Amino acid sequence: MAARVPEQLTLPAGGVVPNNSRPAVLYRAALAEHSPDQIEEYLAARGWTGAWRNGIYAFHHYHSTAHEVLVVVRGQVRVTLGGEGGTSLHLTSGDVVLLPAGTGHRNDGASPDLLVIGAYAGGRD
C-alpha cells in the first residue's frame, strides 16, 4: 500500500486569531483501528504529552505557546481552522490534525459519540 500524503493547510496570519506561518497538517485515517490507550502511547512515544480525552470547544480558540495534535478516536466532527471564515474540515475516526501554536480551531458540529484525544508538543499543556 502506498503511503498517504498528508494535507497541508496554510492559514492566514494576523487578526483576532494569529494562526502560524507553518501549515496545519491533516493525516486522514492515520490512526484508524487504534484504541484510545494505543493512541496515547503512540503520541507519547513521539513527544506529544499532556494527553486528554474529550471533544473540541465550540468556539474559536488557539494555544499561543503550544503545538497541539488532535486525533478523532470515535465519531465525526466539522472543524473550522484559522478563525472566522477559515478552512472547514470534516474529520472522522482515525484522522489526525497537527496544529502549530496559534492556529485557531472550533467545533462546528459533531456526532453524539465524538471522542478526541489531544496532546501537546515539547512538554506543554
Image: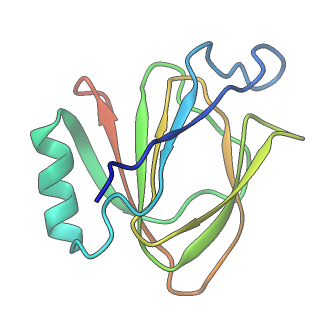
Residue at the right extreme, as displayed: 85
Q: How many marks?
A: 0
In this picture, is 114 found above or below 89?
below
Residue 81 in the image, given as x and y percentages of width and height: 70, 42
Residue name at image x 42 percent, y 28 percent:
67
In this picture, is 66 found above or below 117?
above
Of residues 63 and 30, which is closer to you in this image? 30
Which quadrant would the C terminus be assigned to in this image? Answer: top left
Quarter location, residue 35: bottom left
In this picture, is 89 found above or below 124?
below
Residue name at image x 89 percent, y 41 percent:
85
Residue 80 in the image, given as x and y percentages of width and height: 73, 49
Left or right of residue 10: residue 28 = left
Residue 24 in the image, given as x and y percentages of width and height: 56, 32
- Colour setting: rainbow
Residue 123 in the image, given as x and y percentages of width and height: 22, 27
Residue at the front extreme, as displayed: 1
Residue name at image x 56 percent, y 59 percent:
56
Of residues 49 and 39, which is closer to you in this image? 39
Left or right of residue 38: residue 17 = right
Which quadrant would the N terminus be assigned to in this image? Answer: bottom left
Residue name at image x 39 percent, y 66 percent:
94
Quarter location, residue 46: top left
